[in-house]
Image: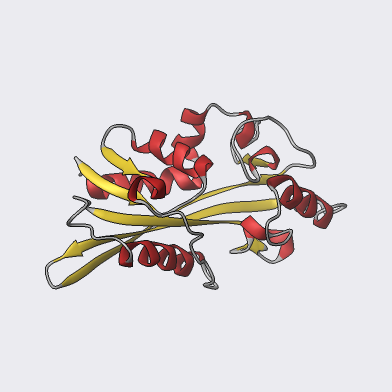
Amino acid sequence: MKRLVFATNNRHKLHEVRAALGGSVQLLALADVGLAADIPETAPTLEGNAQQKAEWVYRRLDLRALALDGVFADDTGLEVAALGGAPGVYSARYAGEHCSFDDNIDKLLRALHGIDDRRACFRTVICLLSPAPGGTERHLFEGRIDGTILTRCLGDGGFGYDPVFMPDRFAVSFAEMPLEVKNSISHRGLAVEALKQHLVP
């Protein structure tokens, strides 16, 4: 079984990804390998941030000594058509540094007040780094789902923008879905499934 470190301090992401991977991969949190610092994410793209975070952790671990097969990180953005793709790469800190999920949602709903076009998509990019003969092997995996931004929060599950995002072909928000349903269709779920297929073909 592959042993991987997920380069995140977000416990909600860790829970979702663990559930999505099931028993096919042994997933370690940063705390499991003695890392507790905030990981920088200053790149202008989701791909850049995922790679930056994975590399930051990769450089600080002795994978051979820890019997690890690799490190991966993800970055996710909510891209709203009427806002020119915002908040995009700034989704987690849309309302400012150290803001809450509620702060971000409030700012988003204010920005869309009175706007009929509420089309949006979620994108997740995962960067996996693994040791390879003569260097490091790098792989990128992406998942995307289209949907609509609701006018108010619905549901109390999930995290982030889940209460105001309703995926296409569904009549409920992400926050109203059981986790197994969300994982089967969501941006992160699709990206993790691509990662899983790579690791366990």
Q: Position of residue 138 (x, y in %)?
A: 28, 65
Q: Position of residue 44 (x, y in %)?
A: 55, 73
- Identify whether 44 is placed above or below 123: below
Q: Pick the residue in front: 121 or 130.
A: 130
Residue 159 shows up from this direction: yes
- The quadrant of the rendering that contains the C terminus is top left
Q: Position of residue 55 (x, y in %)?
A: 36, 67
Q: Residue at x 28, y 32 (%)?
A: 23
The outermost residue toward the left is: 133
- Identify whether 102 is placed above or below 178: below
Q: Pick the residue in front: 32 or 117.
A: 32
Is 62 on the left or on the right of 156, as rendered?
left
Residue 79 shows up from this direction: no
Q: Residue at x 16, y 65 (%)?
A: 132
Is 79 on the left or on the right of 37, as rendered?
right
Q: Position of residue 137 (x, y in %)?
A: 23, 65
Is 197 on the left or on the right of 157, as rendered?
left
